[in-house]
Image (tube, rainbow, N blue to C red):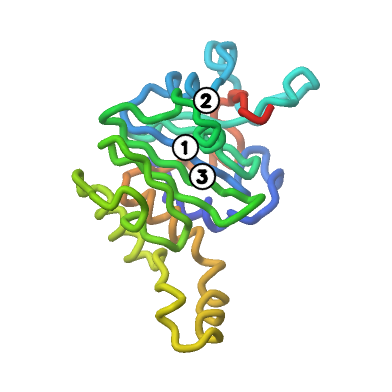
Amino acid sequence: MGDSLGWLGEHCYEPRGKTPGMRGGVSLTAVRGLAVQDLLRRLRARDEDTAAPRPYRDLVRTAAVRDLTPCMYGTAGEWSFVLEDHGSATWYEWWFDDDPEVRPRPGEEMVCLNANIAVQPCRLVYAPGDGPVRFTDFRDSPLDSSPLTDPTAKVTLLDRALREAGAVWPDSRDFSHADDWRRFVDENAARLPAAVWRAVGECLGIRLPRTEVERGDLPAALLRSPFA
């Protein structure tokens, strides 16, 4: 059945390596209805990793593969997913390298929660299946990102889930004084990643097994980054 995604947001800023698997600084890439092997192929996974899967906890990093990014992968209902804890998502990196291979195909629903640790803020990427891909900073509404139309109404549903979770913040210009805005940020910033992760998971029906993820029980693969 899996667990709510909120726990991954709660540990967003925790250093990696505190569990045999993953918990801190995790990014998620998931596509509905796509075979997990096809998702891995788009992310430049090695064929040998998917042909003979091994648990993430048993992954041995050697000099020969130091330029590759380890991930865990699996399925959650209709979704195929990849988890990474190096501070970013390989899908996100290939997108901004303008690689057509990672573009969602017509009808493919796709989501990426990118920890974006190095530069901040965290980013939510969502493609509802109608073609365009929307990029939103955590705290903003996906309805405010281009394009502004929503023919599938799925972006509206995601926006509603984020708002109900308190994950869409008011504009700073809505505050009478700068001190009020800073106070709002101080009171809500720590809760924001968990709120976004939980809302996305509940809205899209993605649940992941926390125990197996933290223990590193899920299969591992090595992905090639455009920066390798």
Do the residues under discs 1 and 3 have CB atoms within 8 angstroms?
Answer: no
Horizontally, residue 149 falls left or right of residue 187, namely left
Q: Label 1 sits on what residue type?
A: Thr
> What is the quadrant of the N terminus in the image?
top left
Please name the residue shown 49% across and 59% down the image.
Answer: 194
Residue 43 circle label: 2
Q: Label 2 sits on what residue type?
A: Leu
Residue hosting label 1: 29
Q: x and y percent of residue 156 in the render?
A: 25, 55
Dot placed on the residue nearer the N-terminal end, 2 or 1: 1
Dot placed on the residue nearer the N-terminal end, 3 or 2: 2
Dot placed on the residue nearer the N-terminal end, 1 or 3: 1
Q: x and y percent of residue 124 in the render?
A: 45, 49
At mark 2, the secondary structure is loop
Label 2, label 1: how many angstroms apart (C-alpha)? 10 Å
Do the residues under discs 2 and 1 have CB atoms within 8 angstroms?
Answer: yes
Q: x and y percent of residue 48 in the render?
A: 59, 11
> What is the quadrant of the C terminus in the image?
top right
In the image, residue 84 above or below residue 105: below
Please name the residue shown 54% across and 43% down the image.
Answer: 27
Q: Label 3 sits on what residue type?
A: Arg
The answer, for residue 159, to whether it is visible in the render is: yes
At mark 3, the secondary structure is helix
The answer, for residue 83, to whether it is visible in the render is: no
Residue 210 circle label: 3
